[in-house]
Every structure is written in C-alpha cells, then in structure tokens.
Image: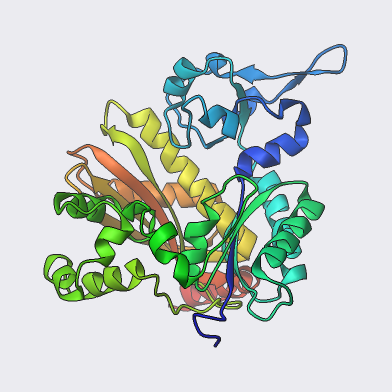
C-alpha cells in the first residue's frame, strides 16, 4: 500500500443528489428553490399549452419532513429532515415534488459506472457517494479530480464534488469544502491550516453526544483535539474512543478502499433538527420512519441484497440510545415489509421521552439471487419439522 506521502484517495460526492435528479427531469426548475417531500398527489400537471404546473410548498398539508432541497432552497433556510409545514412557512412559493427512488437509483448507477471508467478501485458507500483509490493514475491530483468530474457529468449531466487526500478520512472532509461542483486537494502538510480549524463534529464518528462532551471541555475544533495528549483523551473518553480521537485529529486513517466485500448490514438514520415528542410530533416521526425504511430498501435493492433481520435505533433527548431488532421468517427487501417489521420493533420501546435520532438497520444480508433457494429451503424445513 502506498504511504501517506504517495497515497491518493478520492471521495466523490454528488451535489444535492435527489434534487439534481429531479432537475434532470424538470430543467425549467433550475435556479429555483425546490424541495422533495410530497406524495403522488404533487406530481406536476400538464397544462393545455403543454407546460407543467408544479405544486408549491404552500399547497402542502400534513406533518411530513423534507427529503432534500436544492441549494436555492437551502439559501432560504430549508434542509432535509425539516418539518414540511415549517418549510412552507419559510418558503411558501418553493416548488414541491414527490420522492422518486427509481429515478435516483438510475442516476446512481450511471454515476458509479462513470467513476469506474476512470478508476477501477472504487468502494461503494451510498447511493450518491464513493471512494476511489487513484494513487497509480497518471497526472496530478487536480487533473484526476477533473477527469472524475467530467466523466460523471458526461454520463449524468449532474455535478459532483471531489476531494483527494492521503486517506479516506481526509478525502471525505475535503470533498465538502467547495460544494457544489468543487475540487479540493489536500496533503498531510495542509492539516494545520485546512483541517484543524474545522468543527470537530465534521469528522464522521463524532456525533452529538461526543460533540457535547468535547464542548463541555472547551474543545470545538479538530485542532483543539489534536493538541491534547492521547492519555488525556483516553482519560476523558475511554481507551478505544480516546485513542481513535487522537488518531483522526492528526489525520491518520489506514483503511483501504474496499472494492468487493459482503456488507454486514445497511442502515439509515436521521438526527432531527429539534427533539420530537412521541405523541405531538407523531406524524413527523411516522413519515421520517417510513422514509428511512424506503431508503434502506432502496440501498438493498440497488446493491442486490435481501435481509433476514430488521433493527431500529432511537436516541432520546438525554442522549440515551436504545436499539431493538427482529428476525424475519423469510428474507425481504421491499419498503413495506421493512416498515412493518421496524414498526414491531418500535412497539417494544418505551417512548416516554423526546426523540433526537431515529435509525433503521437491515442485517443478516443475503444476495437477492440466493433468496429463492433460501425460501425454498425454509419451506422444506417448515414442512418436515
């Protein structure tokens, strides 16, 4: 494996992916504030003159949440997981479109094929982002990043942001520095000037609870973690997490780009903008729960897996985290089955406190092409036992 001086890892992240996919269908909305959150009743209507009539946020009734928003909508204060009625008060004239996962999977496939045409060493980490090991590709890092971006645009007409760094940790951090449609290249020498000033929570793995504890110790940035000794971090955060904090704050990450692996699980979670009450905010929680199940189902189907176990995770306003799971009688991958099973898990949790985070996880994964054989064997076992 190349060392930190010669290793070049790219993180490629599509820009406002769901919204950008919708703009490919409705180019007349480019430059306008638009959100994805509606139901099938919000599908655009064709007028007599052939033009489209779009629903607006002010037309929305209910207590759902936004799936995504264009950058123009974000400039108005809208963002994913925001209650839709609140978004409607902030930007009543913003365009409202329904979720279309089939469209997003199509563009995801085109995006990833384009990346592989430039670099065969690609790790798939989500519907709209990948890592690529570009250490041996010709050209400097900026040239490689531009080739990746050009390939994606040629295949999809969508933009992406690319970060190239000596490892996956830093590549993911720098891909967010110049969004949208940006290129960011950093080396280990750039750590003090470009990484250390960033908020600690930017590192994947430093969640709300750890951020709150760091803040209580007057630590807000990555650099402020880095100046602390490993022993001090272990004293305050435990052996494993403390040592990890010390490593990542110094930009250390030896994880390889894994091109082929059998995933152990697939999960989606969301941290709410505000703590939600289990009863008063039940419609918002219900829609967010359903959306998470739909996203997990989309991930399973896109990657060709079914699952035998469903789990949920709740984090309450006191930062206590509770999980529950359920083993299914037969493998599934559709959103309806996942939602039904996840709902059973939810009934086993005491919902006496406000909810900060909600997550859904599929595990016990099985390749979809093996599912029929497993189901047949299950029926035989059921018959003869």
Residues 354 and 234: in front is: 234
Q: Residue furthest right?
A: 49
Q: Residue furthest top?
A: 48
Which quadrant of the rendered structure holds the C terminus?
bottom left
For the image, the number of numbered tags is 0
335 relative to 81 in the view: left or right: right
**Residue 354 lies in what quarter of the image?**
top left
278 relative to 35 in the view: left or right: left
Please tell me which residue is depicted at 53% across the width and 18% down the height of the picture.
60
Q: Is residue 356 above or below residue 192?
A: above
> Which percent across, then down, holds residue 365?
50, 69
66 relative to 96 in the view: left or right: left
Residue 265 seen anywhere in this rendered image of the structure: no
Q: Residue furthest bottom?
A: 1
Please tell me which residue is depicted at 11% across the width and 70% down the height of the picture.
235
> Which percent across, then down, holds residue 371?
59, 70
Q: Is residue 260 above or below residue 345?
A: below
> Which percent across, then down, holds residue 234?
16, 72
């Amino acid at each position: 494996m190349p060392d930190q001086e010669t290793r070049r890892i790219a993180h490629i992240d599509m820009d406002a992916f769901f919204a950008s996919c919708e703009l490919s269908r409705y180019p007349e909305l480019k430059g306008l504030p638009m959100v994805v959150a509606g139901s099938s009743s919000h599908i655009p209507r064709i007028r007599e003159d052939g033009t489209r009539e779009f629903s607006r946020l002010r037309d929305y009734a209910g207590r759902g949440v936004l799936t995504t928003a264009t950058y123009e909508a974000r400039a108005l204060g809208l963002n994913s997981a925001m209650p839709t009625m609140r978004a409607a008060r902030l930007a009543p004239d913003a365009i409202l479109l329904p979720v279309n996962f089939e469209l997003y999977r199509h563009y995801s496939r085109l995006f990833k094929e384009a990346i592989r045409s430039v670099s065969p060493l690609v790790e798939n980490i989500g519907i709209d982002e990948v890592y690529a090991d570009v250490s041996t590709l010709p050209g400097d890092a900026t040239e490689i990043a531009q080739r990746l971006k050009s390939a994606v645009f040629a295949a999809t007409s969508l933009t992406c942001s690319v970060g190239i760094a000596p490892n996956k940790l830093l590549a993911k951090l720098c891909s967010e520095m110049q969004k949208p449609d940006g290129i960011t290249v950093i080396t280990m020498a750039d750590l003090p000037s470009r990484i250390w000033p960033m908020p600690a929570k930017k590192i994947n793995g430093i969640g709300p609870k750890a951020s709150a504890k760091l803040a209580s110790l007057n630590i807000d940035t990555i650099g402020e973690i880095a100046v602390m000794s490993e022993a001090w971090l272990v004293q305050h955060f435990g052996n494993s997490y403390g040592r990890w904090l010390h490593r990542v704050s110094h930009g250390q990450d030896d994880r390889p780009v894994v091109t082929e692996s059998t995933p152990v699980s697939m999960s989606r979670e969301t941290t709410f903008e505000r703590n939600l009450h289990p009863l008063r905010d039940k419609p918002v929680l219900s829609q967010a729960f359903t959306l998470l199940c739909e996203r997990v189902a989309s991930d399973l189907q896109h990657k060709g897996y079914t699952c035998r176990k469903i789990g949920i995770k709740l984090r309450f306003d006191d930062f206590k985290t509770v999980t529950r799971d359920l083993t299914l009688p037969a493998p599934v991958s559709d959103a309806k089955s996942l939602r039904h099973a996840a709902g059973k898990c939810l009934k086993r949790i005491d919902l006496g406190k406000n909810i900060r985070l909600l997550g859904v996880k599929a595990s016990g994964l099985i390749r979809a092409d093996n599912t029929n054989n497993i189901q047949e064997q299950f029926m035989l076992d059921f018959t003869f036992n």
